[in-house]
Each structure stands twice: as C-alpha cells, then as structure tokens.
Image (cartoon, rainbow, N blue to C red):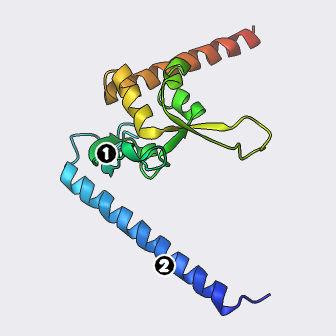
C-alpha cells in the first residue's frame, strides 16, 4: 500500500519539526556546559554529573497561578528532557520520599493506561518532588548520599538472603 502525498507531507513536516527541536535542545545543553565550566567534577561520575538547564517552575498543567519565573536548577542526568510529572513509584525510589510526604504534594490524576477499570494514576509535579527531596536530605549531595545508602542496604539484604540459601 502506497501512501498518498498528504500523509507523506505530514510525516516529512513532523520529522523536520522533531529534528529542529532536537537540534535546539542540543544547542542549549552545549551552551549550558560552556557556561557551567565543568564545576570540577570528574567525567567518570554518572549520577553526579550535572547539567544546568532552564527549568520552568510551572508546567502549566496544574494551575495557571503556579506559573513561576524560570530558575536555574541543577538537574541529574535522568531528569534532563524528562516529563514534568513523576509517578508515585519514581518519587519513592528515585527521590527517596516517604508516602507521607507525597500525601501533601500536589498531583494530577490520569486514567490508568494499563487498564481503565483500575485506580487512576497519581502524577506528581517533578519540580516539587525534587525540591522536597533536596530539602529533606540537605541538598543535592545529601539526596545522592541517601540513594547510595539505600542501594548499599538493599545489596546487603540480598547478600544475606543469598547466604541463607547456600547454608
């Protein structure tokens, strides 16, 4: 089946628009790296290698009055280009926040994409979750340290379980 000119044109325009967006993002990252100057970090660090990027304080999806001025925020690698929303699971595991803290955060409910009959998803605003996590653990480095401690605890627990198997 051959595509007509209309879908071919739409595909071409979408591809060009996507490439333009990608080019602009790459230019912003390069210019941010040049302005940041490296910050004395080694290239081998994966979690702590940072990118400074303009982040819009308000996503425009929750409330109009939440639109704030753009501010410089230090982002981790997994946050660059990520969705402005984060699931409950990601908030608990990546940002090390307890469910009690999530209970007071603003969220948007969306229907569950896996099954519409299931409970709706709660999507939290990533900037708020990031701010609360950094406040809780004393900044960016404290959050990284908490993640490292949790991973170490998980490793020790798994190691102990494995030792019990081989006794």
Disc 1 or disc 2, which is closer to the eye?
Answer: 1
Residue toward you, 38 or 94: 94
Res. 58 visible in picture: no
CA neighbours of label 2 inside 10 A, class few (<14), some (14 to 19), many (20+): few
State left or right for residue 70 relative to residue 111. Answer: left
Query: Farthest residue toward the bottom?
Result: 5
Residue located beneath label 2 in the image? 16
Query: Residue 140 in the image: x percent, y percent?
Result: 33, 30
Q: Nearer the viewer, residue 84 or 81?
A: 84
Residue at (72%, 9%) from the top-left corner? 164
Q: Position of residue 124 (x, y in %)?
A: 52, 36
Q: Residue 8 location in percent, x, y? A: 63, 86
Q: Nearer the viewer, residue 27 or 6?
A: 6
From the viewer's perspective, is residue 98 above or below residue 48? above
Instruction: Bin the neighbour count of mark 1 within 10 Å (Cα to Cα): few under 14, some 14-19, many 20 and up.
Output: few
- Look at the numbered disc 2 and give the secondary structure of its residue: helix
Quick one: label 1 or label 2, which is nearer the N terminus?
Answer: 2
Q: Quadrant of residue 21?
A: bottom left
At mark 1, the secondary structure is loop
Q: Quadrant of the C terminus?
A: top right
Instruction: Tell me which residue sits at (47%, 46%) in the image.
Output: 84
- Which residue is depicted at the point 80% across and 40% down? 117
> Is residue 20 depicted above or below 74 in this figure?
below
Which quadrant is the N terminus positioned in? bottom right
Which quadrant of the view contains residue 42?
top left
- Distance (Cα) linking label 1 and label 2: 31 Å
In the image, which disc is placed on residue 68? 1
- Please, is residue 52 above or below residue 8 in the view? above
Residue lying at 31% horizontally and 26% vertically, measured from the top left: 139
Q: Is residue 51 visible?
A: yes
Q: Is residue 102 left or right of residue 120?
A: left
């Amino acid at each position: 089946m051959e595509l007509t000119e209309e879908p071919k044109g739409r595909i071409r325009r979408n591809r060009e628009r996507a490439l333009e967006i990608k080019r602009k993002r790459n230019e912003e990252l390069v210019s941010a790296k040049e302005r940041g100057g490296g910050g004395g970090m080694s290239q081998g660090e994966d979690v702590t290698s940072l990118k400074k990027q303009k982040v819009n304080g308000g996503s425009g999806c929750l409330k109009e009055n939440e639109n704030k001025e753009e501010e410089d925020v230090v982002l981790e690698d997994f946050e660059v280009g990520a969705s402005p929303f984060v699931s409950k699971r990601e908030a608990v595991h990546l940002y090390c926040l307890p469910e009690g803290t999530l209970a007071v955060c603003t969220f948007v409910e969306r229907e569950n994409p896996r099954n519409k009959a299931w409970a709706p998803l709660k999507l939290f605003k990533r900037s708020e979750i990031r701010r609360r996590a950094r406040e809780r653990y004393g900044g960016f480095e404290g959050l990284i340290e908490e993640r490292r401690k949790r991973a170490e605890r998980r490793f020790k627990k798994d190691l102990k379980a494995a030792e019990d198997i081989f006794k």
